[in-house]
Image (cartoon, grey):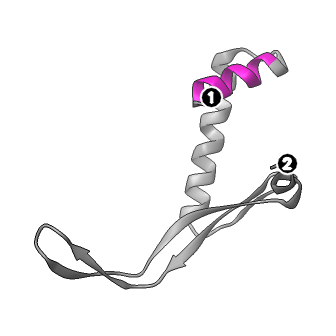
Amino acid sequence: MTKAEIVAEISKMTGVEREKTLRVVEAMMVVIKEKTAGGEDIFLRGFGTFTTKDRAAKVGRLIKENKSVVVPAHKIPYFKPCEDYKDMF
């Protein structure tokens, strides 16, 4: 499902115009990205948690050059669904 399809579904369910729905969906995505990038967790009750995880430094390989490289430690975005959501599968 694409963002456009999500916007269409929400618009149909709520009766709100597509343009307004699109602005709300995009604003929500911006807030989630900005807050998690800033180290803040976002908890959506009944849905899940958006957070970040730490990845340790590791040794990787450049296959074409046949070399080892160090991949530095970094953070990655992470979503953990709530139990009700997981039980749907």
Placement of 8 over or under 76, stated as above or below = above
Q: Which residues are magenta?
A: 3-12
- Secondary element under disc 2, as helix, strand or loop, is loop
Looking at the rendered structure, the kind of residue marked 1 is: Arg
Give above or below for 77 relative to 9: below
Let me know if residue 10 is in the magenta part. Answer: yes
- Where does residue 56 sit, x and y in percent of width and height? 46, 84
Tell me if 67 is positioned left or right of 43 in this view: left
From the image, tell me which residue sits under label 1. Answer: 23
Q: Is residue 85 above or below residue 64?
A: above
**Which label sits on residue 88?**
2
In the displayed structure image, the side of residue 57 where residue 33 appears, left or right: right
State how far apart marks 2 and 1 are (Cα): 29 Å
Badge 2 amino acid: Met
Tag 1 secondary structure = helix
Which is more foreground, mark 2 or mark 1? Answer: 2
Please report the residue visible at 68 percent of the width from the left and 32 percent of the height from the top: 24
Q: Residue at x 18, y 70 (%)?
A: 63
Q: In terms of depth relative to the viewer, which is nearer, 37 or 53?
A: 53
